[in-house]
Image (cartoon, rainbow, N blue to C red):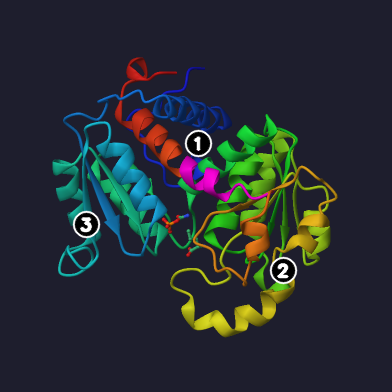
């Protein structure tokens, strides 16, 4: 069946079929090729994009803003301190108004419920640029990077070590489960992902033929990994837990020794960034030969452009 995403939102990868996710990655690779070859298009001409941020961002904001602007679209950055979101005006009412003025809306913030409300009430495609629960656009870039590096996704193994109950880990489980990538999570028991998320990911994985496993042994988690992935120990909004996290997560730092425990000389290192050097990962690994973090960061832009193209344009207007 042909992929048709026009008019759709991206709130979590759980809502997309494996074919739709795979299509977005293929489209991202095509727009990456165009950009590297200096091909300029104006596919967002006459369109506008609202960029709502309750939390800080470097990559996600820059990716949405440049990907949209360089194709003649008009992105408008609206931070929480600029607009009435949830203050004096309900989220639903803000969504209704922005839906009348913009062609699409990106939201980064705390509650998944907020991005859902935007999708329900704006009548326009809405993109989740990160909530406490999910970070779907990140995982598209991660999967693109693994695909580019290893030549395929099915049957590959990605190990996530660190705070395995956070938004990135939860979203990785879904994306990997959908596309046939084995995912192994290594975390202290107190930071294991919730049972429901694991079960949901396992249901996707059983259909794609991959596996989801969780262990508190970091060496076991990375054994045989094609990619080792980590994220900050303290996500945005959880700052008061910093001290405890440093203690609990110290044995889960990704360093050269842990990378060697993959037993796979071709294994790569991934991180969604921003990274706290010396906490979840050493500078040796970040700047070392196995690191692909800058490619991964660049791929945020291409995957985000792919999501916007596929959801704002008709299939006949798309390059693949
Ligand atoms: N990876 C990521 O989402 O980065 P930013 O927080 O800088 O957007
Ligand atoms: N888990 C991190 C991801 C940042 C891109 C956070 O939510 O802060």
Inter-mark Cα distance, 2 to 3: 37 Å
Gap in angstroms between the C-alphas marked 1 and 3: 27 Å
For the image, the number of numbered tags is 3
Query: Compared with residue 207, is residue 88 higher up or lower down, i.e. above or below?
Result: below
Point 58% across, 68% down: residue:
277
Provide the residue designation for mark 2.
252
Q: Residue furthest top?
A: 316
Mark in the foreground, 1 or 3: 3
Label 2: state its secondary structure. helix
> Which is nearer the N-term, disc 1 or disc 3?
1
Tell me which residue sits at (78%, 57%) in the image: 221
CB atoms of marks 1 and 3 within 8 Å: no
Residue 320's quadrant in the figure? Answer: top left
- Label 3: few (<14), some or many (≥20) within 10 Å? some
Magenta region: 290-299
User: Mark 2 and 1 residues: CB-CB less than 8 Å, in contact?
Assistant: no
Specify which label sits upstream in the sequence, 2 or 3: 3
* Pointer 3 residue: 78
* Residue 104 x, y percent position in the rendering: 26, 40
Q: Which numbered disc, 2 or 1, marks the residue that appears first in the sequence?
A: 1
Picture coordinates of residue 201, whole percent (x, y): 64, 47
Asked which secondary structure carries label 1, the reply is: loop
């Amino acid at each position: 069946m042909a992929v048709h995403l026009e008019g759709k939102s991206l709130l979590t990868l759980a809502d997309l079929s494996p074919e739709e996710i795979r299509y977005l990655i293929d489209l991202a690779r095509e727009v990456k090729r165009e950009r590297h070859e200096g091909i300029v298009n104006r596919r967002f001409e006459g369109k506008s994009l609202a960029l709502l941020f309750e939390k800080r961002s470097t990559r996600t904001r820059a990716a949405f803003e440049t990907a949209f602007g360089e194709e003649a679209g008009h992105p408008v950055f609206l931070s929480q301190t600029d607009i009435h979101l949830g203050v004096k005006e309900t989220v639903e009412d803000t969504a209704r108004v922005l839906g009348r003025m913009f062609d699409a809306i990106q939201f980064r913030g705390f509650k998944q419920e907020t991005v859902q409300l935007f999708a329900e009430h704006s009548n326009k495609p809405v993109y989740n640029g990160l909530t406490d629960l999910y970070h779907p656009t990140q995982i598209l870039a991660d999967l693109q990077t693994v695909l580019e590096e290893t030549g395929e996704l099915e049957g590959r193994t990605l190990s996530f070590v660190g705070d395995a109950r956070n938004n990135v880990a939860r979203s990785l489980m879904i994306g990997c489960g959908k596309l046939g990538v084995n995912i192994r999570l290594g975390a202290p028991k107190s930071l294991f992902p919730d049972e429901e998320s694991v079960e949901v990911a396992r249901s996707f994985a059983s259909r794609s033929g991959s596996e989801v496993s969780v262990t508190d042994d970091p060496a076991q988690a990375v054994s045989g990994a094609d990619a080792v992935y980590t994220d900050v120990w303290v996500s945005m909004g959880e700052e008061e837990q910093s001290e405890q996290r440093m203690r609990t997560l110290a044995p889960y730092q990704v360093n050269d020794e842990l990378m060697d425990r993959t037993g796979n000389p071709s294994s790569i290192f991934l991180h969604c960034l921003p990274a706290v050097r010396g906490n979840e990962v050493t500078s040796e690994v970040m700047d070392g030969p196995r690191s692909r973090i800058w490619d991964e960061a660049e791929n945020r832009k291409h995957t985000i452009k792919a999501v916007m193209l596929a959801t704002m344009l008709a299939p006949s207007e798309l390059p693949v």
